[in-house]
Amino acid sequence: MASLALGLGMGLIVAAALVPSDTRAAMRLDAGGVKDGGTLVIAVPTFDFIDPALALDPTSSVSLTASVVAWGVEDASCAMLLRYPVGPPSTQDYTLVPEVATGYPAVSRDGRTYTFTIRKGFRFSTGAPVTAGSYASAINRVLNPAMRSPAAKYLQEVVGAYAMQQGTAQTASGVQVAGNRLIIRLTKKVPDLPARMTMPYFCPVPPDLPIAPEGVAAPLPGSGPYYVAEFVRGSRVVLKRNPFYRGRRAHHLDQLVVQAGDLAETISRKVEAGEADVDLFVPLSRLSELGAKYGVNKTQFFSVRSANVFYLYLNTAGPLFRNNVKLRQAVNFALDRTALLNTFGPHFGSRTDSYLPPGLPGYLNVHPYPVKYPDLKKARALARGHTRSGKAVIYACDNINTDCTAKSQIVQYDLKQIGIDVQIESFPNPVWAAKLGTRREPFDLAIDKYVVAWVDPYEYVNVQRDGRTIHATGNLDRSYFNSAHYNSLIDQAGSLSGSARYDAYGRLAVDIARNAAPMAAFADRNTRFFVSSRVGCVSVAAHGLDLAGLCLK
């Protein structure tokens, strides 16, 4: 993830000054006794696109900040086929639930055709109905090469996607509409397709929404609780209520104003002073202070578990860890996960040894390794006779927010206890990332976070553990783990559906961690945000704060 550089323009001060008289006059109580109406101001660092086909996802190396803001705005204005549930900050639930789809899609016997049935009653903010064709338009728009959408890579298995990308077809032949049904045909099994469709890239769009590689302008029709009424790139976005929305998602405000321009510390201070209402990127320097002052997950400062996991990767293709399960297990027992987590500061995340995040269906609360403190007795027993050269190289980044050097030094100390001398080699972030993704790069260890665009066991197991996907460069399998045995088990898990699939992946993740140990999970990253004293109705979804559900006290 990129480091956070936040901002807020003069427009925020003007907007905030108008809030009291404008909002309080419009306040009303909804049926549940919550105040309904008003304007809420969200202070952000930057904002690039309102166009759903262009809004960068959280895996983007360009700007984490821009992606988080863009996806929050898109989510508030989108009615998706399926989505992740919204709940209180104390919960993490990544179970897919239908929204515009009437239920889970029907899947053909060969697993290559998905049929979504669209429910009636959803409308764009223009009054036009949301139909199966609205989702087909979104998919074809993403695949149009002139659009240059970063989401096209997520649809490469759709029949006809390649022809569109080559410019020999105007629409994907595998995307069809039959009445209220959206039919997607694939070139091979893609068991996580329903989860992929939760991404805002696939928000329904009107059929006449233009192809715009620089992004469309406002107003942009919304299918969810809100729509984009105003947009000034890099400065201001205004979301207003969709008057035709009849869905079940909570929505209380008349409008949300997103303002960009200031630094992290400034935004945090302005929210505290009531000059803004939401800080989505609480700086690390303020986590301890805000937690002590306001408490955690109570009324204003929140730190909630995300689906992103930090791992220590062990290069199983290198001379130290290749065919050396005992030493890989020893590293897992020797690792001081508490010390590693503490380098981030308080309220950053939680210790873990699990390859899957809690809340994911199939997740097993099973711990093959010590989560709190190392078990050096066990680690030394496993390492004995398996340390080979007794030397290792760890590649470290220079990202101050991740503090790779401090973490690498902890790993260096921990492995010294089992007879491994670790040499730290540091690189600028882009160089470091490129090296980790390059096959045969001579490193033995590396710490990196794994960020997902959709939450599904495929993302954690297949992408990181299926050795058949390893290429010369650009690999996310930082361990370069390739096992015929586990490749077969991955195929078996992926061939299942429903709860059986999730359960199989859950068991497989524990099996790989315990018996192959190609990496060591050590922390689940939290999402932190801070709201002003007048903000209520705080809830979270898969990727953080649910903007659509906020209200004013």
Image (cartoon, rainbow, N blue to C red):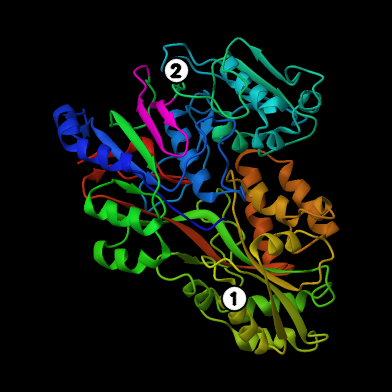
Question: In the rendered structure, which disc, 2 or 1, sits on the residue that comes first in sequence?
Answer: 2
Q: Quadrant of the C terminus?
A: top left
Q: Is residue 58 left or right of residue 277?
A: right
Q: CA distance from mark 2 to mark 1?
A: 50 Å
The part of the image, by quadrant, that contains residue 303 is: bottom left
Instruction: Tell me the magenta residue range.
Output: 224-244
Which one is in front, 309 or 457?
309
Please count the marks in the image: 2
Magenta includes 242? yes
Q: Main secondary structure of the magenta part?
A: strand
* Mark in the foreground, 2 or 1: 1
For residue 455, above or below residue 50: below
Measuring from the top left, give residue 334's x and y in whole percent: 62, 81
For residue 128, above or below residue 329: above
Residue bearing the label numbered 2:
124
For label 2, the SS is: loop
Measuring from the top left, give residue 264's x and y in whole percent: 40, 56
The part of the image, by quadrant, that contains residue 114 is: top right
For residue 357, above or below residue 175: below
Q: Is residue 38 left or right of residue 475?
A: left
Q: Does any portion of residue 107 appear in the rendered image? A: no
Magenta includes 513? no
Residue at the far front in the pictured view: 10
Residue bearing the label numbered 1:
405
Which residue shows up at 53% across the image and 73% down it? 371
Measuring from the top left, give residue 14's x and y in whole percent: 26, 38
Which one is in front, 278 or 486?
278
What type is the residue that disc 2 sits on?
Answer: Phe
What type is the residue that disc 1 sits on?
Answer: Thr
